[in-house]
């Protein structure tokens, strides 16, 4: 193998975790088999809305391999039929009164093997009395809409919350005097994270010790532990969550699902470990979806293209239970970053959350707490404005982008953008794309097409300039179920100078075992190869909220740098004692403290580590080791940004879209491992193509889920993705210890608008201003016909 | 992960053995070849045969060869082998066009052409392709072999003329000179089932075919349609309008119009009725255009 | 029913239920958990293994259908402690993130290179088009396969 030198710190180091994955030696939760383990399976509702008349489990219980059948009634006796959601709502673990979405959990079978568990589901007889379903979010608040949550005392409608942000009066004032106002209804339809590994858990309750061990592919093991303690009333020190290798998360693996709770109950009831792995249909039908925002956007501008204000109203479809996982004060997440990358006079948004007979959840899939919806809306709206003004969308953006000198920038909805040089990023993207040449090619092509060229395609160029808001978050503003959004880190340096870092966040492919070792290496000068990163086990790692919302590097990465610096300061004291000088007289160079003015007099971190554990008389302020611990509370979010340009070719005769090129310039501040950053961007760009062109969970009028398998929920393949063209600018975050920003979701946030804008740019000769995602061939063709599809409902 | 219900497993060692097993199970068994439609349906428990008769050992049914003026395709021929065959490409590029867009390369390694035809999914591609080139199915039963034109093979969605005690063993395609063929499909994504597709085979009059910019006269033509509710995957009216007519854009457009008018697409998440009808027309025109270009030697 | 399957060159005989899927035979009966599963409909391709030298989706093959046949899994890529160039390529070019699709991708890549030692980017994309990846956007998988093509000496096929 070609050897690539391991960098002593940042750089495109090859990943440490790959050694096991390329040999098929990763350990995913379904790879774990415990002695005596049983298998669980969930019986699910075939109806979107129905009253449960009766459940007969006798035949299932009689199956020779079945060890337990659990129903809502049994859970009710244990006070476990309902569990709290992460949004202070409640969710049925197993339905007792009604089922409220197709695929809702009704009963749980525990059997000797997975085949028998599946067989036994067919032996359970449930009598339902079907009720009319609420499918269209825009009709959920109609006075005659069936009330979904009649389990809640006094509930007479499907309203969840109203929330607003920005200065309404100031915004209305600007609109009332604006030269140009454009309005557009924009849907961000329901999609699903669909990681290739589905969700699953093994619960192992030891009756003797009272200890509950849960193997679960969770992105947030510590948060799970605390929530289980709250839900099940088990003492938290008797709960251990082990999150092994995870086959992709994208937000799908943040929440606690009824299947996990059932596995716990199954283990308590049978006294044996119980594994539950959802199948793909269960994953797509019942676990956290994403988006489902029905938005109306308005832009006020001058006739010559100065954007002055943005006004937004949203109906947010949260499904049957408000299971959204976002900071308590932000029921619409960070949607109010919808002012995007532009310098505005005023802005206002109003969001209304509603219940529908669909799967619960409401935030997942690499969305950074609804920044995805916000970025899509504003970038779509800017193109709508460009369409109406007849201006070039790149020029319109360049004119309105925030300028570097405006940072830190207080946004009209209360954010403080930390740093940015937006025009530089857009100029770089345009340069890589050859923007002017593309426009010239397009003009020539449109002429040929207008002249009647047969079988021709139409090219489109789409731009998206996004500002992300990641790294939740400052504890005075942000908590989940009252837990501040901080992350801990512990760093031990062994006597021989090798180190172990323990962190609270959990990788789902991000490569933490590599990048976190690199952060320590950069700070201490210990080779990343000599640093073990421990994560994914609550008994082995400090508390913290986990990996989602691109928060690992902004929060846990910061904790890692801070804890390494603590170790460095301890080492300084020990080095002072070793060199018999005052620690104040020492200077640091990577891996070594030396005497100021006498560089030959120094001690390496390895020498210091050994001395700290040796018979050296310990100086004041150290206890005989270099180990340190910390908790990092971020002072602000980080605001990565980027400029994306997509080129598509559309066949107007069939509606087919081919993505020809995709240019992505990302600025995520300092890059710890550029190879990994680029890899994450690649993945997010593919997500964007998926959402823009094919991914969709739609429902028929009865509430049947129409995207319940990979035959219907389409993931983009290698053939739909072009060879990505990446560029980078680096504007460090001023408040982050190493100047880094999160990047995991940037491309997912930024790319859908670029693709959609490109398709609509191609359709401009037909007078098409807007069409909703996903832009399937049918949707594109219908847009050309002037009869756009309502994509979130069944095609009639 | 979803798993099938119980069934008995039988492995056939010859065609006769397979027929004997089918007779023994009396309609309660299903034949499994590649299994890519049947096994997922069994996992979803939409299919629950009492027995599976595995015919993967019947290598005697895996062949592609010329016999006289016919191309013979064994029913156990894997999609990948059909796609890789230069013999097939030489005579009927429509089959390569269709194979290239059937599922994905891994599925094509295992899936068989006989399995595809017998599954009779309305969105299945080979049925329309074979209908276009007027192929004949050879079916073996207890009392010997019979032949049925592919245009009469399907009796409805997921239903064929193959009886419970019978086995599809071969597809025969007549080879006729002066022809060209092509298959055009629109899918939502690579590997997806067709939103709609059209296959065309066209034979141009030998004298004028490609000569001096003449379009040529259509001596014969076959048109198949996928996923749009065309009876037997076949566009008979469109064909009739073209036979004996010059192979011009105008006539292709009229054939396309007829193909769209005489199909009965159903709306689903792949598209609404008006769009599918439009595609039936548009793709018929495109397939005819390409088939004619190939007949004239203007396109590979 | 008793089946004998040769997996990575070694013969295994087991008593199995006729309905046992090959992917579960490999994972649950032989402990070869490098082969994953991701859907029920033979779409995602993370369960891809070789059956008699050809990549197939093992969630759609019954273990009894593999009786008497040969299977190669990700665990059989490394030979005598030497990584396959495809494995090296995935490390060098960051062809994996969560690692879940990786075994299937690498097996298809190995098969492709055995039949086409110098594939174009387009041919690689076509070859892996029946296998989903949610992390890499496919770019680095394509580069990984190209790396393997460029760094292969005479790689013995199966």
Image (spheres, coloured by chain):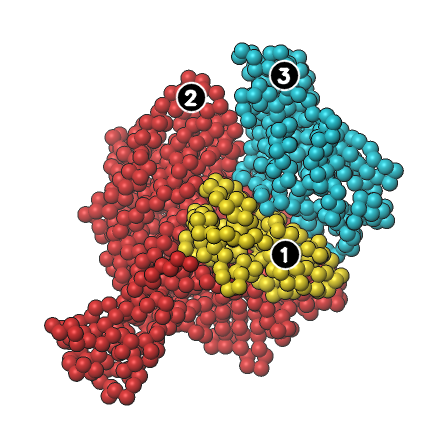
Chain colours: A red, B cyan, C yellow
Please state the horizontal and vertical placement of residue B82, each as a whole percent of the image.
64, 37
* Residue at the image point whose x is 86% and y is 40% from the top: B142
Q: Around disc 3, counting alpha carbons within 10 Å, would you say few (fewer than 14), some (14 to 19), or many (20 or more)?
A: many
Please state the horizontal and vertical placement of residue B244, each as a whole percent of the image.
66, 12
B198 on left or right of A671: right
* Residue at the image point whose x is 31% and y is 30% from the top: A437
Instruction: Say whether marks 1 and 3 touch (CB < 8 Å).
Output: no
A355 on left or right of B208: left
Quadrant in the picture for the N terminus of chain B: bottom right
Mark 2 — residue?
A: A449
Please state the horizontal and vertical placement of residue C148, each as a whole percent of the image.
46, 51
Calculate the distance from the C-alpha at mark 1 to the C-alpha at mark 3.
49 Å
The subunit letter for the residue under badge 2 reads A
Q: In the displayed structure, would residue A598 be above or below residue C128? A: below
Callout 2: SS: helix
Callout 1: SS: strand
Foreground of the two, A472 or C148: C148
Disc marking residue B204: 3
Q: Around disc 1, counting alpha carbons within 10 Å, would you say few (fewer than 14), some (14 to 19), or many (20 or more)?
A: many
Instruction: Say whether marks 2 and 1 touch (CB < 8 Å).
Output: no
């Amino acid at each position: 193998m070609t050897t690539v030198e391991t960098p002593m710190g940042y750089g495109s180091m090859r990943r440490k975790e790959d050694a096991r994955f390329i040999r098929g030696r990763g350990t995913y939760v379904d790879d774990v088999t415990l002695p005596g383990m049983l298998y669980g399976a969930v019986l699910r509702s075939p109806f979107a809305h129905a009253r449960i008349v009766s459940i007969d489990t006798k035949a299932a219980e009689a199956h020779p391999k079945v060890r337990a059948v659990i129903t809502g009634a049994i859970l009710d006796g244990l006070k476990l039929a309902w569990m709290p959601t992460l949004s202070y709502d409640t969710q049925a673990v197993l339905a007792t009164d009604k089922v409220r979405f197709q695929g809702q959990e009704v009963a749980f079978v525990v059997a000797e093997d997975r085949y028998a568990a599946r067989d036994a589901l067919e032996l359970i007889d449930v009598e339902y009395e079907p009720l009319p379903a609420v499918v269209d979010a825009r009709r959920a608040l109609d006075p005659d809409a069936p009330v979904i949550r009649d389990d809640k005392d006094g509930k007479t409608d499907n309203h969840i919350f109203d929330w607003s942000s920005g200065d309404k009066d100031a915004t209305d004032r600007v609109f009332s005097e604006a030269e140009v106002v454009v309005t557009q209804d924009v849907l961000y339809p329901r999609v699903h994270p669909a990681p290739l590994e589905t969700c699953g858990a093994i619960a192992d309750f030891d009756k003797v010790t009272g200890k509950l061990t849960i193997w679960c592919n969770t992105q947030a093991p510590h948060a799970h532990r605390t929530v289980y303690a709250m839900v099940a009333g088990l003492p938290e020190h008797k709960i251990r969550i082990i999150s092994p290798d995870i086959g992709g998360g994208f937000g799908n693996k943040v929440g606690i699902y009824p299947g996990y709770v059932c596995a716990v109950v199954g283990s308590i009831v049978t006294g044996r470990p119980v594994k539950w792995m959802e199948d793909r249909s269960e994953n797509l039908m019942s676990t956290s979806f994403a988006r489902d925002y029905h938005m109306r956007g308005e832009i006020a501008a001058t006739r010559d293209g100065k954007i002055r204000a943005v006004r937004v109203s949203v109906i947010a479809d949260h499904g049957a239970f408000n299971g959204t996982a976002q900071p308590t004060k932000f029921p619409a997440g960070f949607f109010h970053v919808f002012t995007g990358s532009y310098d505005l006079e005023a802005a206002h948004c109003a969001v209304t959350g509603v219940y529908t007979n669909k799967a619960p959840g409401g935030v997942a899939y690499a969305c950074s707490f609804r920044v995805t919806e916000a970025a899509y809306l504003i970038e779509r709206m800017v193109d709508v404005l460009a369409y109406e003004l007849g201006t070039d969308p790149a020029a319109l953006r360049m004119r309105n982008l925030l300028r570097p000198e405006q940072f830190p920038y207080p946004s009209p909805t209360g954010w403080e953008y930390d740093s940015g040089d937006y025009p530089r990023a857009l100029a770089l993207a345009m340069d890589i794309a050859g923007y002017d040449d593309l426009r010239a090619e397009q003009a020539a092509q449109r002429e040929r097409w207008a002249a009647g060229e047969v079988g021709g395609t139409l090219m489109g160029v789409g731009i998206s300039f996004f500002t992300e808001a990641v790294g939740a978050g400052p504890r005075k503003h942000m908590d989940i179920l009252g837990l501040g959004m901080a992350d801990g880190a512990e760093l031990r340096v062994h006597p021989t100078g090798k180190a172990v870092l323990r962190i609270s966040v959990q990788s789902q492919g991000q490569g933490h075992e590599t990048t976190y070792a690199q952060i320590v290496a950069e700070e201490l000068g210990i080779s990343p190869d000599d640093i073990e990163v421990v994560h994914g086990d609550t008994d082995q790692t400090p508390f913290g909220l986990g990996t989602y919302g691109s928060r690992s590097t902004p929060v846990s990465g910061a904790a890692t740098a801070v804890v390494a610096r603590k170790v460095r300061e301890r080492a300084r004291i020990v080095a002072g004692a070793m060199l018999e000088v005052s620690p104040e007289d020492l200077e640091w160079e990577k891996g070594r403290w030396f005497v100021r003015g006498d560089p030959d007099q120094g001690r390496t971190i390895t020498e210091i580590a050994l001395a700290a554990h040796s018979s050296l008389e310990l100086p004041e302020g150290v206890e005989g080791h270099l180990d340190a611990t910390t908790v990092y509370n971020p002072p602000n979010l980080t605001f990565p940004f980027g400029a994306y340009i997509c080129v598509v070719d559309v066949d107007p005769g069939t509606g087919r879209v081919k993505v020809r090129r995709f240019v992505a310039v990302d600025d995520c501040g300092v890059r710890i491992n550029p190879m990994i950053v680029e890899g994450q961007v690649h993945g997010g760009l593919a997500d964007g193509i998926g959402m823009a062109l094919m991914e969709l969970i739609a429902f028929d009028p009865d509430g049947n889920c129409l995207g319940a398998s990979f035959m219907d929920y389409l993931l983009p393949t290698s053939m739909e993705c072009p060879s990505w063209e990446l560029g980078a600018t680096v504007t460090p975050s001023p408040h982050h210890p190493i100047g880094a920003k999160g990047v995991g979701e940037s491309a997912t946030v930024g790319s859908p608008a670029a693709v959609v804008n490109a398709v609509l740019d191609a359709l401009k000769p037909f007078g098409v201003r807007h069409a909703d995602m996903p832009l399937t061939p049918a949707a594109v063709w219908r847009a050309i016909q002037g009869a756009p599809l309502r994509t979130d409902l069944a095609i009639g | 992960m979803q798993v099938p219900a119980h069934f008995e497993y039988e492995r056939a060692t010859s065609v006769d053995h397979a027929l004997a097993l089918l007779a023994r199970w009396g309609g309660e068994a299903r034949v499994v070849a590649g299994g890519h439609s049947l096994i997922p349906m069994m996992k979803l428990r939409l299919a629950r045969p009492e027995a599976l008769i595995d015919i993967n050992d019947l290598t005697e049914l895996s062949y592609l060869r010329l016999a006289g003026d016919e191309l013979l395709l064994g029913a156990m021929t894997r999609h990948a082998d059909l796609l890789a065959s230069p013999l097939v490409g030489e005579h009927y590029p429509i089959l390569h066009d269709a194979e290239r867009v059937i599922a994905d390369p891994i599925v094509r390694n295992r899936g068989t052409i006989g399995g595809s035809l017998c599954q009779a999914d309305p969105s299945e591609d080979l049925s329309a392709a074979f209908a276009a080139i007027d192929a004949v199915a050879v079916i073996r039963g207890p009392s010997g072999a019979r032949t049925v034109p592919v245009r009469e093979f399907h009796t409805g969605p997921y239903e064929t003329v193959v009886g419970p005690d019978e086995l599809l063993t071969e597809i025969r395609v007549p080879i006729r000179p002066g022809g060209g063929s092509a298959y055009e499909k629109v899918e939502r994504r690579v590997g997806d089932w067709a939103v709609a597709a059209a296959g065309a085979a066209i034979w141009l009059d030998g004298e004028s075919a490609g000569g001096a910019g003449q379009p040529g006269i259509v001596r014969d033509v076959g048109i198949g349609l996928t996923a749009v509710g065309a009876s037997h995957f076949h566009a008979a009216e469109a064909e009739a309008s073209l036979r004996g007519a010059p192979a011009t854009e105008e006539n292709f457009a009229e054939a396309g119009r007829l193909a769209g008018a005489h199909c009965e697409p159903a709306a689903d998440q792949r598209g609404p009725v008006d769009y599918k009808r439009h595609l039936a027309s548009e793709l018929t025109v495109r397939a005819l255009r390409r088939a004619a270009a190939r007949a004239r030697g203007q396109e590979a | 029913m008793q089946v004998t399957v040769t997996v990575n060159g070694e013969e295994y005989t087991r008593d199995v239920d006729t309905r046992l899927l090959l992917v579960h035979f490999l994972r649950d009966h032989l402990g070869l958990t490098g082969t994953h599963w991701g859907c029920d409909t033979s779409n995602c391709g993370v369960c891809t293994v070789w059956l008699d030298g050809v990549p197939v989706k093992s969630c759609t093959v019954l273990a009894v259908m593999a009786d008497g046949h040969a299977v190669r899994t990700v665990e059989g890529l490394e030979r005598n402690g030497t990584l396959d160039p495809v494995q090296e390529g995935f490390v060098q070019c960051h062809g994996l993130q969560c690692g879940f699709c990786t075994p299937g991708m690498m097996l298809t890549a190995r098969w492709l290179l055995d039949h086409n030692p110098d594939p174009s980017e387009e041919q690689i994309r076509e070859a892996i088009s029946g296998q989903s990846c949610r992390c890499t956007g496919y770019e680095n998988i394509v580069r990984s396969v190209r790396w393997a093509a460029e760094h292969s000496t005479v790689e013995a096929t199966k």
